[in-house]
Image (cartoon, grey):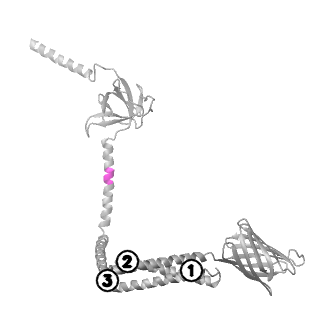
């Protein structure tokens, strides 16, 4: 072996030795101090030993070891001294661009683990935490394919709908109809404007007539108000007045609406002035009608009819009565009853308060007085004393079983043993 061969072999051996040393010293630093943290992942998407570890985007260490376990992958990170990681930080795997080198990314916790005056807790060396699996290119492509498939189904559905000849014809006709409708609305607006201009004189006459009518309504309402002050709140007169006032109010409201519509198209200043004056009169008449209706609204009429069986005599008695209330608490009772060939009249006036009602007048065709007492929401008791020449006492009870239906029990002549009559039956209120 000559010298050249020896020198070449020595040089090659030196290069091989240098390569071996460089391979063994990969990742070696002169300052190898630090501590280990571990993170568990289901998959690491090509992460390798020596790749960087970043906390909030700052390099704080490198990947030292990757262990495969039955439940995934444990990645051990060599952290620099002074790089303290707060508890509840999130560990995931990032990438330098779409196809670049992988790295472990650590995100600070969403909320600080400590409060003011209390130190923040950091992860201790050697702890193994759960990492968040990265969204790899495979998952992104799968999601993209799902979106693309949904889009294709939507396009196919639209094609099925729009591909139908009937649908296309209907859409075209709808567009044409909408265009024609818009043109008709423009023509209608122009026609109404021209009509208002050509018939201004007729509008002026109409407004004048409305004004005279409103003044008449106002005068009628005032006179009716004065007349009402001298009338009682009962009888046919009150009913007629109520109907008249309702008609006045209705007429005033209709005039008000008509003039409000005319005011929008009136162009003559005098016409606008007449419209405003007429509106004032009609509103005054309507307000007066409302006031009068309020005065007579206290008149209330109610009544009832009943069928009772006389268990003593074995006969039926039918009765009906009408109660008319005017001023608060005051009422009049008018009624009658029939039992066999006998008919009796009831005509009384009374007053009601929080304790009950007191009545006086004709009871069963005889002078007398009566008292009613409401016991709760359903039971009413009544006591009548009548006929001064042969005093009789009647006790009555009504039990409400439905909003307009009551069961009735009555004992007449309870102070006369031989002449006592007991009734029971049903009453219907209206």
Q: Nearer the viewer, residue 19 or 292?
A: 292
The picture places residue 60, in percent across and down from the top left corner, at: 32, 28
Dot 1 lies on which element?
A: helix
Q: Which SS does the magenta portion mostly show?
A: helix
Q: Assess whether residue 150 is covered by the magenta stretch.
A: no
Name the residue located 72 percent from the left edge and 73 percent from the top edge.
Answer: 351
The residue that mark 2 highlights is 263
Residue 405, quarter of the rendered image = bottom right
In this rendering, the answer to whether 148 lies above or below 389 is above
Name the residue located 26 percent from the left edge and 21 percent from the top edge.
Answer: 25
- Where does the magenta region start and end? 145-149
The picture places residue 111, in percent across and down from the top left corner, at: 42, 37
User: Given contact means CB atoms under 8 Å apart, are the residues at marks 1 and 2 in contact?
Assistant: no
Residue 59, quarter of the rendered image = top left
User: Given contact means CB atoms under 8 Å apart, are the residues at marks 1 and 3 in contact?
Assistant: no
Q: CA distance from mark 3 to mark 2?
A: 15 Å
N-terminal label among 3 and 2: 3
Q: Is residue 410 left or right of residue 25?
A: right
Crowding near the residue tagged with mark 3, few <14, some 14–19, many ≥20 C-alpha atoms within 10 Å:
few
**In which quadrant is the C terminus drawn?**
bottom right
The residue that mark 3 highlights is 195
The picture places residue 401, in percent across and down from the top left corner, at: 71, 70
Q: Nearer the viewer, mark 1 or mark 2?
A: 1
Q: Is residue 352 visible?
A: yes
Q: Nearer the viewer, mark 3 or mark 2?
A: 2
The residue that mark 1 highlights is 225
Q: Assess whether residue 146 is covered by the magenta stretch.
A: yes
Q: Nearer the viewer, residue 216 or 253?
A: 216
Q: CA distance from mark 1 to mark 3?
A: 42 Å
Q: Nearer the viewer, mark 1 or mark 3?
A: 1
């Amino acid at each position: 072996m000559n010298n050249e061969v020896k020198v070449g072999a020595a040089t090659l051996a030196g290069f091989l030795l240098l390569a071996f040393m460089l391979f063994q010293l990969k990742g070696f630093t002169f300052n190898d101090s630090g501590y280990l943290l571990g993170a568990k992942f289901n998959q690491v998407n090509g992460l390798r030993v020596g790749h960087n570890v970043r906390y909030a985007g700052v390099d704080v260490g490198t990947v030292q070891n990757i262990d495969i376990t039955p439940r995934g992958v444990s990645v051990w990170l060599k952290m620099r001294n002074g790089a303290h990681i707060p508890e509840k930080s999130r560990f995931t795997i990032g990438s330098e661009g779409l196809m670049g080198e992988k790295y472990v990314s650590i995100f600070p916790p969403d909320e600080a683990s400590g409060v003011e005056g209390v130190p923040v807790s950091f992860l201790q060396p050697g702890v193994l935490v759960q990492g968040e699996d990265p969204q790899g290119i495979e998952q992104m492509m799968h999601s993209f394919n799902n979106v693309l498939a949904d889009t294709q189904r939507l396009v196919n559905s639209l094609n099925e709908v729009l591909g139908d000849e009937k649908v296309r014809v209907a859409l075209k006709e709808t567009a044409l109809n909408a265009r024609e409708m818009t043109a008709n609305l423009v023509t209608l607006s122009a026609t109404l404007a021209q009509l208002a201009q050509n018939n201004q004189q007729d509008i002026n006459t109409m407004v004048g007539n409305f004004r005279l009518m409103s003044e008449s309504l106002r005068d009628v309402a005032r006179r009716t108000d004065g007349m009402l002050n001298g009338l009682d709140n009962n009888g046919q007169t009150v009913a007629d007045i109520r109907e008249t006032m309702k008609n006045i109010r209705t007429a005033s409201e209709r005039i008000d609406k008509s003039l409000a519509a005319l005011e929008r198209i009136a162009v003559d200043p005098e016409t606008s002035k007449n419209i405003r004056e007429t509106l004032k009169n009609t509103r005054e008449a309507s307000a007066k009608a409302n006031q009068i209706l309020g005065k007579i609204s206290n008149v209330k009429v109610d009544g009832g009819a009943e069928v009772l069986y006389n268990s003593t005599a074995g006969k039926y008695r039918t009765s009906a009565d009408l109660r008319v209330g005017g001023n608060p608490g005051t009422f009049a009772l008018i009624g009658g009853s029939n039992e066999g060939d006998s008919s009796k009249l009831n005509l009384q006036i009374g007053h009601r308060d929080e304790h009950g009602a007191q009545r006086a007048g004709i009871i069963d065709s005889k002078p007398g007085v009566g008292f009613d007492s409401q016991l709760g929401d359903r039971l009413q008791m009544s006591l009548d004393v009548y006929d001064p020449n042969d005093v009789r006492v009647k006790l009555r009870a009504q039990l409400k079983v439905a909003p307009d239906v009551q069961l009735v029990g009555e004992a007449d002549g309870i102070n006369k043993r031989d002449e006592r009559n007991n009734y029971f039956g049903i009453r219907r209120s209206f």
